[in-house]
Image: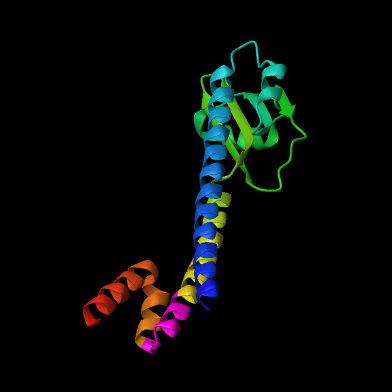
Amino acid sequence: MKKVSYGSLYIALVFLLVGIAFFGYFQMQEANSLDDKRNVLSSYDDNGFDDEKLKQLSFISSVKVYDVSAVKPDSVFEYVKEAKPQYAYESNRRSVLGDSIHSGSGEGNWYIELERKSYHSTSFYFLFAFVILYWCFFSYWSFMKLYEDKKMSLKWGLTFVFFNLFGYYVYHLTSESNG
C-alpha cells in the first residue's frame, strides 16, 4: 500500500508543478500581448503603420485607425461605431486558448482601436484546474497515510481536505508528540 500512497503524492506534486508552469507560461504570453499592444499604440504617426511590422506582432489580430480631429471628445465612441476607418489591418491568426480583447486609445487627431489575444484568464483557469487535481491527489494520499497509520478519523480526514499541507503538518506534529 505504501507504493500506492506515495505514488499519489508524487502525482499530486507533479500536478501542482505543471499547473504553476502553465500559469507562468500563459502570464508570459499575456505580457507579450501587452507589449504588442504598446508597440502598436506607440508606432502610429501621420504616415500610418508599417504593415510588415504589424504582421510580426503575434498577438494583434486587428487594428483600425480613425481620424477624430473634427469630432468632439465626448462623441468619439459614437463616431467610431458609424465611421469607416482611415486605416484597417486584419490578421488571420486565431488562437484556441486565450480571449479576444478589444480596446481603443485616442491621442490627438487619431483614435486607434485594436483587438489582441489575452491569456490572463486562461492562466488562472489552468492554475485552478491543476491545483484542484493536486488537492484531490494529496487528499487521497493523506487518507492512505491515515489508514496505514491506523488513525483514520473524521477529524483528520476533514483537516486534510480543508487545510491540505498545513493539516498534514499539524497531523505530523501531533503524531510525533504522541509517539
Q: Residue 11 versus residue 80: which sits nearer the camera?
A: 11
Q: Is residue 171 visible?
A: yes
Q: Position of residue 85 (x, y in %)?
A: 70, 26
Q: Position of residue 109 (x, y in %)?
A: 56, 19
Q: Is residue 124 visible?
A: no
Q: Classify residue 83 by image quadrant.
A: top right
133 horizontally vs 177: left or right? right
128 horizontally vs 158: left or right? right
Report the number of discs.
0
Question: What is the magenta segment's predominant secondary structure?
Answer: helix
Q: Residue at x 65, y 15 (%)?
A: 48
Up-down: is 20 above or below 111? below
Q: Position of residue 129 (x, y in %)?
A: 56, 61
Q: Residue at x 66, y 37 (%)?
A: 81
Q: Residue at x 67, y 28 (%)?
A: 64
Start-end of magenta stretch: 142-154
Up-down: is 99 above or below 128? above
Q: Residue 174 versus residue 113: which sits nearer the camera?
A: 174
Magenta-drawn stretch contains 25: no
Q: Position of residue 68 (x, y in %)?
A: 59, 24
Q: Residue furthest right?
A: 92
Q: Residue at x 43, y 78 (%)?
A: 145
